Amino acid sequence: MAYRFSLAFLTVYEVEPPEAVRIAAECGYDLVGLRLLPAAKDGPYRIMTDDGLLAETLAAMKETGVAVADIEIIRIGEHFDLAATEPFLARGQMLGAKHILVAGDDPDEARFTLNYGRFCDLAARYGLTCDLEFMPWTQVPNLTHAMRVIKAANRANAGLLVDTLHFDRSHSTLAQLAEVNPALLHYVQMNDALADYDPSNEGLIRIAREERLYPGEGQLDLKGILGVIAPDAVISLEIPHLQRASTTPALERARAAIEAMKTLIRQVQ
């Protein structure tokens, strides 16, 4: 089987979901990722509450055959409210989503693990996996920490989300990744970056949100990661770049991303 490609929300963050679906279809993606809830403290995205936009999105999906892979974002902090996540889960089910991006903000690992497990249980009722993404500035900073939580939670719909930028910046290793059960990697976020970077939290966040590169433009070991993940993995291309977004249309950026990824894959194969 071949890789399947998903157009991540952040790559074309300025467009509404129906347009993202159509862009994905035109560029040859199989799937899209959609953000329903914010990464910061602003309000929910329109798709979360606007039934008309939901209907338009579903119509675009039916028309193109592009499905929703993942929805964003659930942040589990010390004051996590499980019941408050249910509208998000219901919306994800309406969209036919399969996976949820989960971030860890609770410094108490035992409490975080408990709440992550409880969220997995609730999400399972909606047919969704809970994919824990490690990011070096969060309370789940690396692959080892994420796997410790996932193993302790011990839920069938738990998952590990590897983002190639965070993988590199957290000093996680290919040997560690090779030990992960492939069944936990429901999708992998691919992007590139320069080898030199500001290691402060502010610097890490700035690059992650504003300066990611197309595969092959930087020095991350993407070929090494491709050599470890399953050959039929879902590759989500998450490549936000603020300067490019100000000058290059979303369609062109989405096409450049998948073409760069396919070029890299051909070099490995």
Image: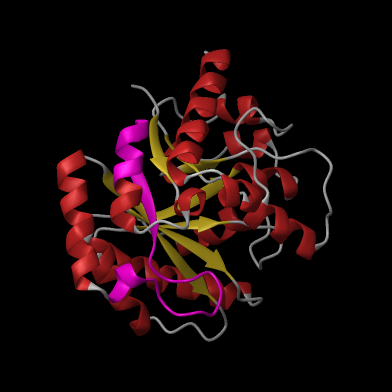
Q: Is residue 255 magenta?
A: no
Which quarter of the image is occupied by the N terminus?
Answer: top left
**Along the line of sight, the residue nearer the viewer: 23 or 111:** 23
Question: Looking at the image, can residue 95 be seen?
Answer: yes
What colouring style does the render use? secondary structure
Which of these two is toward me, 221 or 176? 221
Judged left or right of residue 254, residue 29 is left
The percent coordinates of residue 196 (x first, y second) are 84, 42
| 185 to the left or right of 216 | left
- Residue 210 or residue 40, whichever sits in front: 210
Q: Does residue 3 sit above or below 266 in this rendering? A: below
**Camera sees residue 240:** no
Q: Residue at x 74, y 31 (%)?
A: 219
Residue drawn at the location 37% of the way across and 32% of the way down = 27
Image side of residue 95 versus residue 204, left or right: left
Q: For the point 42% across and 43% down, which residue is it?
A: 7
Part of the protein shown in magenta: 22-49
Q: Position of residue 206 (x, y in %)?
A: 71, 59
Q: Position of residue 3 (x, y in %)?
A: 40, 28
Tell which residue pokes out farthest to the front in this image.
247
Depth order, front residue of 118/35: 35
Q: How many marks?
A: 0
Task: Return the x and y of residue 157 as percentages of the image width and height.
Answer: 35, 56
Judge left or right: residue 89 versus residue 223.
Answer: left
Residue 116 vs 264, above or below: the answer is: below
Which residue is pictured at 77% across the width and 65% down the height?
Answer: 202
Q: Quadrant of residue 168?
A: top right
